[in-house]
């Protein structure tokens, strides 16, 4: 469990956060797999207020679903969904650290101009060749995620020889690409559920310390995912307890940021783990 603070350059300022931290999910989409995270502008303001009160350090907002089997929407539709939400939340909570979940450089640029301070990219810069230079010019931290395939195809037949080794190698290369592009602050995400079977996901979780050797903060998104639901035979709406257990294991494995639908429960994990390890949260 990492306890040293994270320091990021965001625009013309330095932001320091204690670690580990919690990122709350707000989806400006009609089809994200967990219905409670889907919000319009008014719903986003209410959910953002609650998540911030519960202890979220970052709010992650996306306008295009990346659930398995989802289809690509137009850039215009993505912008129409996510920009009003980011603008409204930034205006209401100007000190809050906001992240935009997108693989499109134009959406990232518009979102940062609207108030976002991080870019969270499921494509790790490979789905849009302009993403890395755009983020470098924006001077914001960047989250690079591993994904085998695309959201439309990733769960058809994911195959690995050594999932943890292959994900670590991939993310090592993306860190190098980000640094070469001029992005100083890179966060890596192993992409649980993105082109991985449940067996792959659990192997990856067990071997999370291998990713930590890369030296970048590690974000994990386990919240209410299939790796919980499939094992327990439950829908996402009933997967909070299983998510809490997996978040605990992720912190033990070295995760720095927990990306979650349920902030209060994730903060309880962080606080209890801190006491267990005698590291105040």
Image (cartoon, helix red, strand yellow):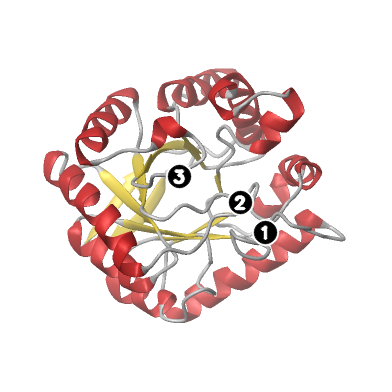
Name the residue at the right extreme: 161
The tag earlier along the polypeptide, 1 or 3, is 3
The tag earlier along the polypeptide, 3 or 2, is 3
- Residue 63's place in the image compared with 207, above or below, is below
- Residue 236's place in the image compared with 206, above or below, is above
Query: For this rendering, which residue is in front, 245 or 88?
Result: 88
Q: How many marks?
A: 3
Q: Identify the residue position indicated by label 1 in the image.
A: 154
Q: Is residue 171 left or right of residue 75?
A: right
Circle 1 — which element? loop
Image quadrant where one finds the N terminus: top right
- Residue 159's place in the image compared with 263, above or below, is below
Residue 31's quadrant in the figure?
Answer: top left
Image quadrant where one finds the C terminus: top left
- Tag 3–tag 2 contact (CB < 8 Å): no
Q: Identify the residue position indicated by label 2 in the image.
A: 68
* Residue that appears at 68% across and 63% down: 148
Checking the image for residue 31, the label placed there is: 3
Residue 10 image position (x, y, % from top left): 28, 59
Name the residue at the left extreme: 91
Q: Nearer the viewer, mark 1 or mark 3?
A: 3
Q: CA distance from mark 3 to mark 2?
A: 11 Å
The tag earlier along the polypeptide, 1 or 2, is 2
Q: Is residue 248 left or right of residue 106?
A: right
Query: For this rendering, which residue is in front, 129 or 58?
Result: 129
């Amino acid at each position: 469990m990492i306890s040293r603070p994270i320091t990021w350059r965001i625009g013309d300022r330095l932001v320091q956060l204690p670690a580990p931290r919690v990122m709350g999910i707000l989806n400006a989409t009609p089809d994200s797999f967990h219905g409670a995270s889907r919000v319009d502008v008014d719903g986003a303001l209410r959910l953002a207020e609650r998540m911030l009160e519960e202890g979220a350090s970052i709010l992650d907002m996306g306008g295009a679903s990346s659930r398995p089997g989802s289809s690509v929407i137009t850039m215009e539709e993505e912008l129409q969904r996510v920009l009003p939400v980011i603008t409204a939340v930034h205006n209401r909570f100007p000190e809050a650290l906001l992240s935009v979940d997108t693989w499109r450089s134009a959406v990232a640029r518009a979102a940062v101009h609207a108030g976002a301070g991080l870019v969270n990219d499921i494509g790790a810069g490979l789905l849009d060749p302009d993403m890395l230079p755009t983020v470098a010019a924006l001077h914001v931290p960047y989250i690079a995620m591993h994904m085998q395939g695309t959201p439309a195809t990733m769960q058809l037949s994911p195959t690995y020889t050594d999932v943890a080794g292959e994900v670590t190698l991939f993310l090592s290369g993306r860190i190098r690409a980000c640094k070469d592009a001029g992005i100083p602050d890179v966060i890596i995400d192993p992409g649980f559920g993105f082109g991985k079977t449940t067996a792959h996901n659990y192997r990856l979780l067990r071997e999370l310390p291998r990713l930590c050797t890369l030296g970048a903060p590690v974000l994990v998104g386990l919240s209410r995912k299939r790796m919980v639901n499939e094992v327990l035979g439950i829908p996402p709406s009933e997967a909070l307890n299983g998510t809490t257990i997996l978040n605990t294991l992720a912190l033990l494995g070295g995760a720095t940021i927990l990306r979650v639908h349920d902030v209060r429960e994730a903060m309880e994990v962080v606080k209890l783990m801190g006491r267990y390890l005698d590291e105040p949260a």
